[in-house]
Image (tube, rainbow, N blue to C red):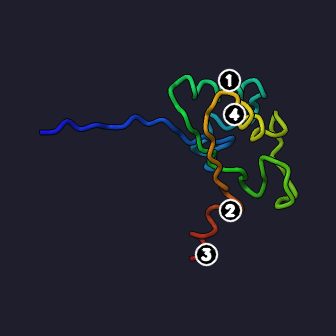
């Protein structure tokens, strides 16, 4: 029998706030208050753990973006003004690939409730 070769997982999802408040109750407030140095440390921590790629789950949530945009009149008021720029900058410095999904523009439950 041939040995089974399993490739290691070298990437992960990450987010600035979890869309489901019940699931995120243990860490949403903590992430909301992360400073620039904490976000940079978190990116380095992922790299040090052996990850070479990360995927941002959402660039917006609940009709608010994590960056300045004309799409929404409101922006998330986090401890840092632009967490996306901080993560991208630190990842670039250490050679960590970042993939960005669009995320939750509007109420993510709408498509289920209207059927």
Numbered label attached to residue 107? 2
| Residue 4 sits in quarter | top left
Give the answer, above or below, for where 69 lies relative to 1.
below
Q: Nearer the viewer, residue 61 or 2?
A: 2
SS under mark 2: loop
Q: Nearer the viewer, mark 4 or mark 2?
A: 4
Few, some or many C-alpha atoms within 10 Å of disc 3 (few <14, some 14-19, many ≥20)?
Answer: few
Q: For the residues labelled 1 and 3, say whether their Cβ atoms are less than 8 Å apart.
A: no
* Mark 1–mark 2 distance (CA, rounded to whole Å): 31 Å
Q: For the residues labelled 1 and 4, say whether their Cβ atoms are less than 8 Å apart.
A: no
Residue 49 is left or right of residue 44, and the answer is left
* Mark 1–mark 3 distance (CA, rounded to whole Å): 42 Å
Q: Residue furthest bottom?
A: 115
Give the answer, above or below, for where 44 lies relative to 65.
above
Picture coordinates of residue 15 (x, y %)? 64, 42
SS under mark 4: helix
* Mark 4–mark 3 distance (CA, rounded to whole Å): 41 Å
Q: Nearer the viewer, residue 101 or 19?
A: 101
SS under mark 3: loop
Q: Which residue is mark 4?
A: 92
Q: Which residue is mark 3?
A: 114
Q: Which is nearer the N-term, disc 1 or disc 3? A: 1
* Mark 1–mark 4 distance (CA, rounded to whole Å): 14 Å
Q: Which residue is mark 1?
A: 41
Q: Is the C terminus in the top left, top right, bottom left or bottom right quadrant?
A: bottom right
Q: What residue is rendered at 66% in x and 50% in y?
A: 58
Q: What residue is rendered at 52% in x and 25% in y?
A: 49
């Amino acid at each position: 029998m041939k040995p089974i070769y399993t490739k290691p997982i070298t990437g992960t999802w990450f987010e600035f706030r979890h869309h489901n408040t019940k699931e995120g109750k243990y860490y949403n407030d903590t992430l909301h208050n992360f400073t620039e140095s904490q976000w940079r440390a978190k990116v380095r921590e992922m790299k040090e753990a052996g990850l070479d790629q990360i995927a941002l789950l959402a660039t917006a949530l609940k009709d608010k973006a994590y960056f300045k945009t004309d799409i929404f009149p409101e922006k998330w008021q986090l401890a840092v003004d632009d967490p996306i720029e901080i993560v991208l900058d630190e990842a670039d410095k250490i050679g960590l690939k970042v993939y960005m999904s669009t995320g939750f523009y509007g109420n993510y439950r709408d498509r289920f409730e209207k059927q």
